Amino acid sequence: MSAQNSAGIQTLLDAEREASKIVQKAREYRTKRVREARDEAKKEIEAYRADKEAEYKGFEAQHTQGNKAAEEEANKEADEKISEIQDVGKKHRDEIIKNLLSAVSHAHPTPVS
């Protein structure tokens, strides 16, 4: 009986070792798949990010051009107004200086309420 028990125990130990190897292989496979899935997800995220970045750049370029045109138009109008004011100032320089000197030298203080 002892030989049969010993053989049975040995068979059980062999089965346990084999099961342990199978479990280890399954863990290694699972770890490998997790790494592959993570790498694949990183690639997909990077592709999505690049796509959205390109989309944003296009949107920004399209709308910035409109802003640049408006800015150039506003600068042009401002330059025209400045030029116009300078021309009026040159034409009426003597009168402006006379009015400024008069206002400074003949001040009429008024009480502030």
Image (spheres, helix red, strand yellow):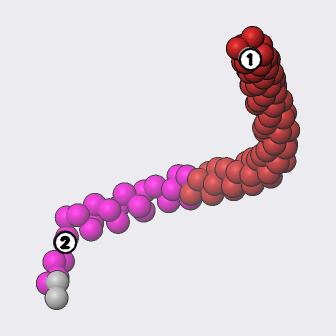
Question: Within 10 angstroms of label 1, few (less than 14), some, or many (20 or more) residues?
Answer: few
Name which quarter of the figure residue 29 lies in: top right
Magenta stretch, main secondary structure, is helix
Find the magenta span and give its range: 86-111
Secondary structure beneath label 2:
loop
Point 74% across, 52% down: residue: 67
Secondary structure beneath label 1:
loop
Q: Nearer the viewer, mark 1 or mark 2?
A: 1
Q: Is residue 101 visible?
A: yes
Badge 2 is on which residue?
107
Task: Give the residue type that dot 1 points to.
Answer: Met
Relative to 113, say whether 82 is above or below: above
Cα distance between the residues tagged 1 and 2: 132 Å
Asked whether 28 or 40 is in front, the reply is 28
Badge 1 is on which residue?
1
Q: Quadrant of the C terminus?
A: bottom left
Asked whether 87 or 23 is in front, the reply is 23
Relative to 73, say whether 27 is above or below: above
**In the shown orientation, is residue 96 left or right of residue 18?**
left
Asked whether 81 or 4 is in front, the reply is 4
Question: Within 10 angstroms of label 2, few (less than 14), some, or many (20 or more) residues?
Answer: few
Q: Quadrant of the N terminus?
A: top right
The answer to if 90 sits in the magenta stretch is: yes
Task: Give the residue type that dot 2 points to.
Answer: Ala
Name which quarter of the figure residue 21 lies in: top right
Extreme front residue here?
1
The answer to if 21 sits in the magenta stretch is: no
